[in-house]
Amino acid sequence: MFFKLLVDGGVEPSQQNVSKCDLIYRTVCRGNKKMEFKDFLNAIVKVAEFLFHTVVDDSSVALKALLEHHLMGLYLKLAVKTETIVESMQLEFNELVLVILKDVSPTLLYIY
């Protein structure tokens, strides 16, 4: 499902992308079959870093590029408003993810 989300957002389904995204999924979910929202947030950052590593060095810029080029189009297809909830959720993910996601959390929550 995780990679299908990325493909639906326009990520090319090449063997390299499939393999790397599968590895990211297994690493972030630590063997669990179900991805929690905190895992989704961490995975999205890692996918962005992988897909845009040749273009940018900064994780936040890579995430912004992933959102603009792939996931925002998917979100716009869904066309539903959501509330900002990152601040109210009791989630554990790295500090960089929290900073990056402050403005885009409604979009990511709905896509998730």
Image (spheres, helix red, strand yellow):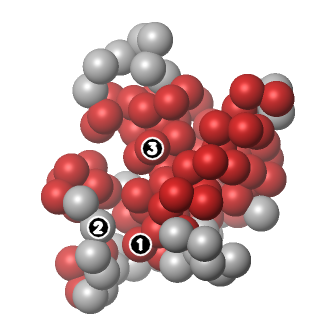
Q: Residue at 41% across / 58% down in the picture? A: 42
Image position of 94 (left or right of 41): left
Q: Quick one: label 2 or label 3, which is nearer the N terminus?
A: 3
Residue with the mark numbered 2 = 93
| Total number of numbered discs in the rendering | 3
Q: Marks 2/3: CA distance?
A: 12 Å
Give me the disc on residue 38. 1
User: Which residue occupies the foreground of this view, 97 or 70?
Assistant: 97
Dot 2 and dot 1 residues touching (CB under 8 Å): yes
Residue 40: percent from the left, percent from the top? 51, 64
The crowd level at tag 1 (other Cα within 10 Å; few <14, some 14-19, many 20+) is some
Say what secondary structure mark 2 lies in: loop
Q: Is residue 13 visible to the viewer in this orientation of the structure?
A: yes
Q: Quadrant of residue 61?
A: top left
Sequence-earlier tag: 2 or 1? 1
Is tag 1's residue or tag 3's residue first in the polypeptide sequence? 1
| Residue ID at (42%, 46%) | 45
